[in-house]
Image (tube, rainbow, N blue to C red):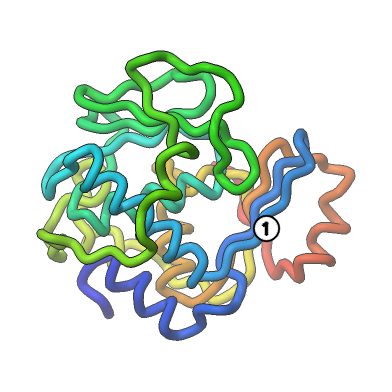
Amino acid sequence: MAGTLPELFSAAVRRDGASPFLTYYDDASGERIELSALTTANWVAKTANLLVDEYDLESGETVAIGLPPHWLGVVWALSTWSAGAGLTTGDSTIAITGPDFGLRGSRETIASALLPLGGRFREPIPADVHDYGAEVYNHPDVFVPFDPPTADSPAYDASTHADLIAAAKPITERVLTTTSLVTPDGIGTLVGVIAGGGSIVLCRNLDEAKLDRRIADEKVDRILEDN
């Protein structure tokens, strides 16, 4: 078993990089996006480069994610870990927020408009907030950490990388959930899927009338109960 979450994810990319890893639906907007492990890795590398090169994120610092259930939450979690930093549910050095601008970091705040393909805001945003969609595409899709995490590095609040990996139950199936994968209730699912080679259908604003058809179309093996 890999010692850190980036190592675990890199193994998943090597093992089955072209297969679906994360499929995201928003039934309010009609958005659907499917990311393979390899495509996710490209987004992770771009975002990690953004965090390190533009916002000076260093090993041991903290990042908070204030997003609804969304595929970018997964990208930001993996990017944070890749840079050697940890996720926190408390005060953070850097924060990523949605279009409500409801979360702020002590040094930097980045916002996503949550538009398809991570698109930039179409209207002006606060002067002290960076537009993720306007900046991320300028960065390369290969990331080499200066100070990578170890198994004992903080990964999520008081839990280390080793703690999260040991606690997660490997998931080999294709599972459907409406729970954000970067919350305390969802982080185990994310780590479990990476460890077990499964995949996730993440639904925001789920229309229950579409559930049976979605299970069939996406070949879902199991629905995860919300906590």
- Rendering coords of residue 193 (x, y %): 48, 67
Residue sitting at x 67%, y 55%: 33
Q: Residue type at mark 1?
A: Ile
Query: In screen coordinates, is 135 left or right of 62?
Result: right
User: Relative to 220, does residue 44 appear above or below in the rendering?
Assistant: above
- Rendering coords of residue 82 (x, y %): 26, 59
Query: Could you tell me which secondary element the residue under label 1 belongs to?
Result: strand
Q: In which quarter of the image is the C terminus?
A: top right
Q: Is residue 176 visible?
A: no
Residue that extends furthest to the bottom in the rendered view of this protein: 15
Residue sitting at x 86%, y 48%: 210
Depth order, front residue of 50/203: 50
Residue sitting at x 26%, y 32%: 94
User: Relative to 106, does residue 13 appear above or below in the rendering?
Assistant: below
Residue sitting at x 27%, y 80%: 1
Query: In screen coordinates, is 80 left or right of 113?
Result: left
Depth order, front residue of 10/208: 10
User: Relative to 209, does residue 41 appear above or below in the rendering?
Assistant: below
Quadrant hosting residue 51: top left
- Rendering coords of residue 79 (x, y %): 33, 53
**To which residue does mark 1 refer?**
223
